[in-house]
Image: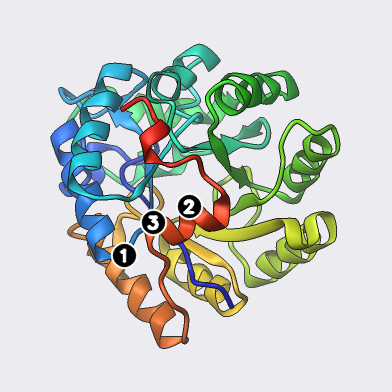
Amino acid sequence: MSSIIITCAITGSVHTPTMSPHLPITPEQIAREGVAAAEAGAAILHLHARNPADGRPSPDPSLFMDFLGRIKSGCDAIANITTGGSALMNLDERLAGALAAAPEMCSLNMGSMNFGLFGAATRYDSWRFDWEKPFLESSRDLVFKNTFQDIETIFDVLGASRGARFEFECYDVGHLYTLAHFAERGLVEPPFFVQFVFGILGGIGADVENLVHMKRIGDKLFGDDYVFSVLAAGRHQIPLTTAAATMGGHVRVGLEDSLFVERGRLAASNAEQVAKIRAIVEGLGRTVATPDDARRLLQLKGPDKTGF
C-alpha cells in the first residue's frame, strides 16, 4: 500500500457556532487550526471561510487570502479550497475564494443534490446567532446546485486556466459516473483524487457495504487512474475512515465533518481528530504521507505557483 494521505477539513459550512465552542470562525482561528492539523499529520487542508463577526459561511476572497497567507507561512500543507461554499451561494460566490487564490487543489462536488441539515435545528434550545436555526431549516427545501455546465465552468476557470487539480467529492454512485463522463471527454485527466462522502442526508448512507460498493465502481470506472479517500459525517467519521485505511484508501477528518472525537466528547481541535486517525492508520501499518508525498502522488503544481 502507498502512504496514506490525511486530509483535514477545518471548518466547512455545515456546523454552526452554537454546536461547538471549538469551531474556528475567524481567519486567525482557521489558520491556527490548519497549522496545528498539519503538524499532527494532515497533508491536505480543506478550507472554507466564515464571517468573523457571526460565523456564517462567507464567499469573501479577502477572508480566504488572510488565512491562506498565515497557513502558508506556518506549514507546507496543501491548501484545498472549496468550490462548494454553501448551498445558499451562487456559483460566482462559491468560486470567488478559489479564483483569487489559484490553489494547488480545489474541492468539486460532482453533482446537484438535496443536502439535508434541518435535523440539527431541533437539537438546541438556544442559539448564539440569529442566522443559525433558519440556515439549517432552509435545507428542507434547498438543493445544492452543481450542474454539468457548472462543473464544466469549474474545470475551465480553475483547472485549465489556473492549474488546480481537484478533490472530486462523490456523495453517491451516480457522481462516479459523472466523473467518468468528464474523463471520457478529456476535460479532466488522471490521477483522480476521489473523495467518497457518506452520511449526508440526500447522499449515500454511511454503511461499510456502501463503501465497498463505491470502491468496486471506482475500480471499474477508473482502474489505476484514481485513488480514493473517505469522509463520513458525524459519528461515522472514525469507523468509515478506519475501514478505508484497511482497504488501501486515504482518509479525511476535521470539524467540518464531525464535531466529536469520541462518543459524547467534542473535539477540542482539528488536530485532535488528525492525531486520532493517524494513530489508527499507523497501527494498521500505513505510513502517513507528507505534503510533498501527496503532491507527487496527485501531480499538483506546487505551492510556488499559487496566488497566495
Q: Nearer the viewer, residue 105 or 231?
A: 105
As measured in the structure, the alpha-carbon distance from the residue carrying label 2 to the one carrying label 3 is 6 Å
As measured in the structure, the alpha-carbon distance from the residue carrying label 1 to the one carrying label 2 is 15 Å
Q: Nearer the viewer, residue 72 or 167?
A: 72
Q: Quadrant of the C terminus?
A: top left
Q: Nearer the viewer, residue 5 or 122?
A: 5
Identify the mark nearer the N-term, 1 or 2.
Answer: 1
Mark 2 surroundings within 10 Å by alpha-carbon count, few (fewer than 14), some (14 through 19), many (20 or more) = many
Give the residue at mark 3.
Answer: 291
Which of discs 1 and 2 lies nearer the camera? The answer is 2
Instruction: Specify the amino acid type for callout 2.
Output: Arg
Give the residue at mark 2.
Answer: 295
* Mark 2 vs 3: CB contact within 8 A: yes
Which of discs 3 and 1 lies nearer the camera? The answer is 3
* Mark 3 vs 1: CB contact within 8 A: no
Residue 76 lies, in percent from the top left, at 29, 50
